[in-house]
Amino acid sequence: MTTYVTTNPATGATEREFPELRDDQVDDVLDRADGAFADWRATPAADRAAVLVRVADAYEERSEELSRLIAVEMGKPVAQAAGEVKLAAMIYRWYAEHGPDLLAAEVLDPQGAEQSVVETVPVGLIVGVMPWNFPYYQVARFVAPNLMVGNTIVLKHAPICAASAEVMAEIFHAAGVPTDVYVNVFATNDQIATMIADPRVRGISLTGSERAGAAVAEVAGRNLKKAVLELGGSDALIVLDDDVERIAKSAAKARLGNTGQACNSPKRMIVDNAHLDRFVSTVVSVFESSAVGDPTDPDTRVGPLSSVTARDTVVAQVARAVEQGATLHTGGDAVEGDGAFMRPAVLTGVTKDMDAYAEEIFGPVAVVYGVDSVEEAVELANDSSFGLSGSVWSSDLDRAREVADRLEVGMAYVNEHGTTLPGLPFGGVKRSGFGRELGRWGMGEFVNTRLRRVAAAKG
C-alpha cells in the first residue's frame, strides 16, 4: 500500500494515490542521475541560469494553480500559498542572476607560484528529502543552487506532497532541465538510506524533524557523505518595549502563519511581567478573530493542520500542558466535523518541569512567558535544545542589537521574525541542524572548493 496519498486536510477525503518507487528501480534512478552529471556540469553556467529564469517564469505564470494545489494538498490558505509561490520564483531568479558570478574562479595571492586560483565546481549527484509545510519554497532553496552549480538531483518529497512534487518536476523539465538531471521519486525511507550509502551519491540535504535528521545523519556519517540538515525550532521572541499591543499583534499574526506549522515561527513569546497581561490579551484577541476554515477561501487566515494526526498531536500537547499546570487562555481544542482543524491556543504559566517547555509545538499555539529582566529573557530564550532563529523587538535599536547578539541561534532578527529572502543565509545551530541554504552560502554546501596552483617550470 502506497504512503504517497493526497488527503485533503480540510475535508478528510482521499483525492489521489501515487505508486511508490519499487526497490528494483532504485539502481536505475541512481544510474540515470549519475550518468547525466557529466553533460550537466559541462553546460555553460549562463545556460543553466537561463533554465532557472524559465522556472521562475513558470511559477509566476502558474501561481493560481500552484497555490490551490497545496491548499488542497496540505491545507495552506491560498493567500499564503501565493506568497510561497512568489518566494520560490524569487529564489530561482536570484540564483539565475547571481549564480554565474558566484561560480567565477577566485584569484589568490600566488604565494611563490605563477598562479593560485580557487575554483567552485560541482560534486555530482545530490539527494534531497523535503518536508510538507512549505512544498515549493523548501524545494527551491535546495534545488536552485544545486542546479546552478551543476549538480544533479534525486528528490524525495513528503508523502502528502506527491501532487506538487509531480508538478515541480514537470516545470523543471519543461524549462529545460534534462529529465535525468532532476528525478522526482516517491521513495521509502529505506530506499533513501540505500541511496545515501551508494557511492554514486555525493551528498544529502534534508529538511524535516529531528528524528528524520538523526536517521539521515547516521547513514551519511557512516558513509562519509556531506549532509545539510534543517530541522526543528522553538524560536523565542523577546519584547523590550512597552508598546506591547502593536508587537503582540505582529507576533500573533506571525505565529498563525501556515497554521503555526513553520520551524522558524515565534513559538515562545517573552515579555516583561509588567506588560504580560496586556500582551496576552492582545494575542488572544488576534487568535480569536482570525478566521479558521477552508484554505481555498481567500478570507481564511488559519487553515487546517496538515493531517488529522498532526492536529491531534498538537491538541494533545496543549491538553498535557494544562494537565501539568499551564493556563489556557483560548482555543486548544479540535473543531468538530471533517478535516484537521483546531482553534488556535494561547498558553501561559509553562514551567521547566512541563513537557511544553522543551518540545516543539508544530501548530497554532503561542506560549507566552513573563520575565522580570532582560537577563532572564535571554536566559530563557537560550534555554532550548533548538537554535534556529529568534527576534528582539524594541524602538531602541542599539539595545535590541545587543540583546539579539546574545541569542544562540543561526538567525537573529530585530523588529521582525522569520524573514527569509533569496540572498540571506538560512539555517540553525544546536538541534536545529547544520549547514546553510540560500544566498552564496547555499551555493557553497555541495561543491568542491578546488585549488589550482601553477608553479614555474624548474630548469
Image (cartoon, rainbow, N blue to C red):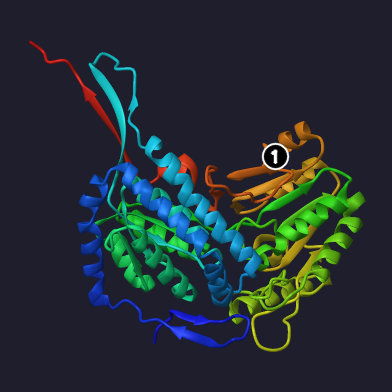
Q: Which quadrant holds residue 289?
A: bottom right
Q: Quadrant of the N terminus?
A: bottom left
Relative to 271, 431 lies left or right: left
Relative to 302, 69 lies left or right: left
| Residue 106 on image: x %, y % | 35, 27
Q: Which quadrant holds residue 265?
A: bottom right
The one nearer the camera, 446 or 428, is: 446
The one nearer the camera, 43 or 102, is: 43
Near mark 1 (Cα within 10 A), the count class, few <14, some 14-19 or many ≥20, is many
Q: Quadrant of the C terminus?
A: top left
Q: Which residue is mark 1?
A: 404
Residue type, numbered disc 1: Ala
In this view, the residue farthest toward the left is: 459
Relative to 208, 254 lies left or right: right
| Residue 214 on image: x %, y % | 45, 60
Q: Residue at x 66, y 60 (%)?
A: 358
Asked whether the viewer can see residue 362, the reply is: no
Q: Residue at x 28, y 78 (%)?
A: 22
Q: Residue at x 38, y 66 (%)?
A: 169
Q: Residue at x 25, y 67 (%)?
A: 29
Q: Is residue 342 above or below residue 277?
A: below
Asked whether the viewer can see residue 35, the reply is: yes
| Residue 20 on image: x %, y % | 35, 79
| Residue 184 on image: x %, y % | 35, 67
The one nearer the camera, 74 or 373, is: 74
